[in-house]
Image (cartoon, rainbow, N blue to C red):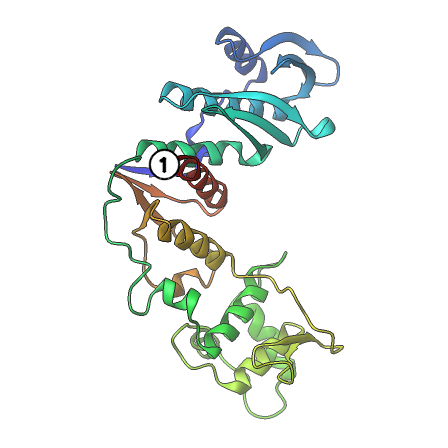
Amino acid sequence: MTLVADASEEMAVDADPVKALMGADRDGWLVYHGFVAGERYDVTVAGQRRDLPAADVLALVDRLRAMRRMTDEGVPAQLIEMRGGPDLDTYVLNVDGRVVELPAGQVLDWSAGYLAAWRGRDQEHAGVDQMFGADGIARLLEHPTEDEQRQMILLGLMNGGDQVISANDLIARMRPLVIEGKPPVKKTVISALTFGKKLMPNNAELMLRALGYWWDTERGPTAVSDLDGRPAEPLPEMPGLVILRRIMQVAQAGWLRYVGDPDPNRARWPLLEPPAVTIGPFRYELGASSVLAWLDGVRAFNEVRE
């Protein structure tokens, strides 16, 4: 069975705040007192009386449903408190007798990961772990070559910041910097950023300068400084490799198996398809926006058991 590990897609909350609140009141999750001025709703939840805007109401009911789902499947879960001033951005939960504090936006995915680990408890994690091939993801993460370290830096600067820089954007930035010869074409740039392929020093230098930095080789072969000579650390990381590193750590602990694409080059750009893992008989496809909180839930369940 394949499940999408994005609880926000699984929770089908009513778009009408009143309908959602009345249903939650009926089920005993909260007390709905009524509508108040300014498009806000008066509720009591976890012993706290709050007036909430519509978006917060829908998110709250969604999270309460996630906890009810855990309870229904055998993991008692309830909301104890909401903290964080007017934004209520921290939820305090009791999960199977354990008090857990989570950012509000992670509650759905964390609870889904915890529940996935609970479903697969005491079972073999089916499937071949495809991270640990001879030249796969684990090798890249644990023993990258010097060229691959530089490729990771370049790709992190392109994809890990506030603005995503495509290969075409990078080429446009490189053209004015070319003094002799022709500017690189897209095929050359893509090849230079492919793990396992040679990154020519002139291409590495040109690409990094186009991104506003230079290789500070006096400090080390992969050290980076800005154009004013100041060390540029920490640098943004490739989002795809951040995700794969976290999956690898959980896989190495024996809590799941990675059964997604074994080629680390799939992580160079924003993930085109979700990574896939198995826990027990279930296969989960991990959405990029939800995977880290989901993995935290898997870890939380297993660490309690150890």
The residue under label 1 is which amino acid type? Ala
Q: Position of residue 97 (x, y in %)?
A: 48, 23
- Give the camera-side residue of 294 and 163: 294
Where residue 273 appears, x then y in whole percent?
Answer: 38, 51
Which secondary structure lies at badge 1?
A: helix
Image point (43%, 44%), residue name: 287
Residue 263 position within the rendered picture, expressed as x and y whole percent measured from the top left: 34, 63
Q: How many marks?
A: 1
Is residue 225 shown to the viewer in this render?
Answer: yes
**Horizontal and vertical percent position of residue 303:** 43, 39
Rendering quarter of residue 96:
top left
Q: Residue at x 47, y 61 (%)?
A: 269
Relative to 107, 225 lies left or right:
right
* Other-residue count near label 1 (Cα within 10 Å), few / some / many at <14 / 14–19 / ≥20: many
**179 displayed left or right of 143:** right
Quarter of image, res 142: bottom left
Q: Quadrant of residue 120?
A: top left
- Residue 303 vertical position relative to residue 75 in the rendered view, above or below: below
- Judging depth in this view, the residue of 174 and 42 nearest the camera is 42
Q: Report the residue marked by disc 1.
A: 117
Determine whether 293 is above or below 264 in the image.
above
Q: Quadrant of the C terminus?
A: top left
Q: Residue furthest front?
A: 306
Note whether 16 is above or below 283 in the view shown: above
User: Residue placed at 27% from the left, 39% from the top?
Assistant: 280
Of the pair 35 and 187, the residue shown nearer to us: 35
Q: Is residue 271 visible?
A: no
Q: Residue extending furthest bottom?
A: 180
Viewer-proximal residue among 306 and 210:
306
Quadrant where the N terminus sits is top left
Residue 161 left/right relative to 7: right
